[in-house]
Amino acid sequence: TKGSAGQSAGVFKPTTEDYQKVYNAVAKELWEKDEYDDGSYGPVLLRLAWHASGTYDAATGTGGSNGATMRFAPESDHGANAGLKNARDFLEPIKQQFPWISYSDLWTLAGVCAVQEMQGPIVPWRPGRQDRDVSFCTPDGRLPDASKDQNHVRAIFGRMGFNDQEMVALSGAHALGRCHTDRSGYDGPWTFAPTVLTNDYYRLLMEEKWGWRSWNGPKQYQDKTTHSLMMLPTDMALVQDKSFKKYVEKYAKDGQAFFDDFSNVVMKLFELGVPFESKPEDRIKFKPTIDDA
Ligand code: HIF
């Protein structure tokens, strides 16, 4: 068949331009649906892509973004994934519009789009993920528990194959979005501009004074100046641990170093466990739509 976009899934061979069209469609919805939460679906889309990818276990090669198994219970019902239905539902009309893309490629592409449209760095991306059935759901407990310390952070991200520097570089994503009492139980944003990616997360960790919040919810920190920002115990672990802290200092001082390292580590996260046929040099750099907004 002649296979134009969206016609026959088996024959159609999408090009870079076709993937850019998907990117543009996600970006358009992101900008249009600006009444959600702090004014953007960007943070929750990034969290979906990360939770899809962060189930990876290097030792067994299981989990990761390949498969998009969070479409199914039990994985969709894992406590760590509470609230991510918002992101999956947001992407459903895009999937209908471009039926040739797999959910697993779409979720990670949308994560890249969210980072870039929230003024973050370009994150090179490549397709090749295939959706898998419910039998590929990962067991509960692979995603991090925010109430824990640096040993837990190292165990979880070490299992995926990350080193200390990469763990800290990734963590800057908490500049974005917020905690919701009806999802994680925690409450509030990490920064004052939760829909723009900056190195503010590191700056606040270094420069702000933090204390325990007194409330009925789970143990979390609040800033002593405005009482309107939060840090999770796992966030604070990054300045309580010497090896982590040196990278926090670095990224607090150098926003460009953060962007460069963040781009690399997010790219790596989204590719964990994916059996690509393409080569690293085939990665696509999507053009952000905010350049011409
Ligand atoms: Fe998060 N994260 N994350 N996270 N996360 C939450 C929200 C977001 C952890 C816990 C939480 C990363 C690491 C860790 C985002 C992106 C990333 C919430 C709040 C919790 C509890 C959920 C809610 O209530 O809605 C823990 C324990 C992590 C390991 C230390 C990554 C590095 C920072 C890997 C990452 O990219 C984003 C974005 C959000 C905001 C979601 C939103 O809906 O606003």
Image (cartoon, rainbow, N blue to C red):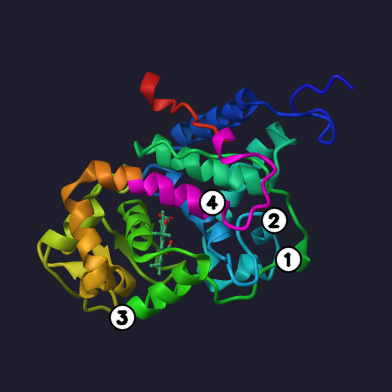
Quarter of the image where the N terminus is located: top right
Q: Tell me the quarter of the picture where residue 167 sits.
A: bottom left
**Sequence-earlier tag: 4 or 1:** 1
User: Closest to the observer: 244 or 94?
Assistant: 244
Marks 2/1 in contact by CB < 8 Å: the verdict is yes
- Residue identifier under label 4: 270
Q: From which residue to which does the magenta span run? A: 261-282
Q: Which mark is residue 216?
A: 3
Circle 2: residue type: Gly
Q: Give the tally of numbered discs.
A: 4
Question: Whole-Å distance between the Cαs marked 4 and 3?
Answer: 36 Å
Question: Whole-Å distance between the Cαs marked 4 and 1?
Answer: 17 Å
Q: Position of residue 144 (x, y in %)?
A: 46, 72
Identify whether 51 is placed above or below 210: above
Circle 3: residue type: Asn
Mark 1 burial class by Cα count in 10 Å: few <14, some 14-19, many 20+: some
Question: Whole-Å distance between the Cαs marked 2 and 3?
Answer: 38 Å
Question: Whole-Å distance between the Cαs marked 2 and 1?
Answer: 7 Å
In this view, the mark in front (2 or 3): 2
**Sequence-earlier tag: 1 or 3:** 1
In the image, the residue with mark 4 has its CB under 8 Å from the nearest atom of ligand 1: no
Mark 3 burial class by Cα count in 10 Å: few <14, some 14-19, many 20+: few
Q: Which mark is residue 67?
A: 2
Rendered residue at 20%/63% (across/down): 246
Q: Is residue 269 magenta?
A: yes
Secondary structure, mark 2, is loop
Q: Position of residue 83 (x, y in %)?
A: 52, 60
Q: Position of residue 202 (x, y in %)?
A: 22, 56
